[in-house]
Image (cartoon, rainbow, N blue to C red):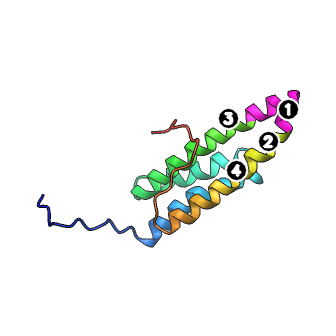
Amino acid sequence: MEENQQVEPVVVDKEQRTWAMLCHLSALAGFIIPMGSIIGPLIVWLVKKDEMPLVAEHGRKSLNFQITMLIAYIVCFILMFAVIGVILLPIVAIFSFIMVVIGAIKTNDGKEFNYPFSLNLIK
């Protein structure tokens, strides 16, 4: 490639950004339905991953983060017997909520977003 040649950024249409945003926002179902934080993103990801590459990427990121948060919730529950879990559980829940909202907003704006502290379990 020549040095003066510019590469145009890939433009992602609004529909893909909306579905990718739903991968993140569907995780909020976990605050209402048990295991909804994993089931919501999983459904969106499975339905749209083959036809929308952006949804495949963000669905995978959302699922990895939600599985990581599930592990954190389990650890907090176990630590409740040592009282520290009572303090940690709301902190983990607030952190999870904030990260999901930030992820949804950045994804809808077409910006790159990676969850912090997320285990890369689904590749």
Identify the residue under disc 4.
95
Residue segment shown in magenta: 74-86
Image position of 23 with respect to 74: above or below: below
**Numbered circle sitting on residue 89:** 2
Identify the residue under disc 1.
80
Residue 26 shows in this picture: no
Give, as a three-letter code, the residue at label 4. Phe
Tell me, yes or no, whether the two marked residues, 1 and 2, touch with CB atoms within 8 Å: yes
Give, as a three-letter code, the residue at label 1. Met
Residue 45 in the image: x percent, y percent? 51, 52
Query: Which mark sits nearer the N-terminus, 3 or 4?
Result: 3
Q: CA distance from mark 1 to mark 3?
A: 14 Å
Residue 69 in the image: x percent, y percent? 66, 41
Mark 1 surroundings within 10 Å by alpha-carbon count, few (fewer than 14), some (14 through 19), many (20 or more) = some
Mark closer to the observer (3, 2): 2
Q: CA distance from mark 1 to mark 2?
A: 9 Å
**Numbered circle sitting on residue 71:** 3
| Residue at the image point whose x is 74% and y is 38% from the top | 73
Q: Is residue 8 left or right of residue 63?
A: left
Looking at the magenta stretch, what is its main secondary structure? helix
Query: Which mark sits nearer the N-terminus, 1 or 4?
Result: 1
Image position of 19 with respect to 71: above or below: below
Give, as a three-letter code, the residue at label 3. Ile
Q: In the displayed image of the protein, which residue is found farthest to the bottom? A: 14
Q: Is residue 67 left or right of residue 81?
A: left
Mark 2 surroundings within 10 Å by alpha-carbon count, few (fewer than 14), some (14 through 19), many (20 or more) = some
Give, as a three-letter code, the residue at label 2. Leu
Mark 4 surroundings within 10 Å by alpha-carbon count, few (fewer than 14), some (14 through 19), many (20 or more) = few
Query: Which mark sits nearer the N-terminus, 4 or 2?
Result: 2
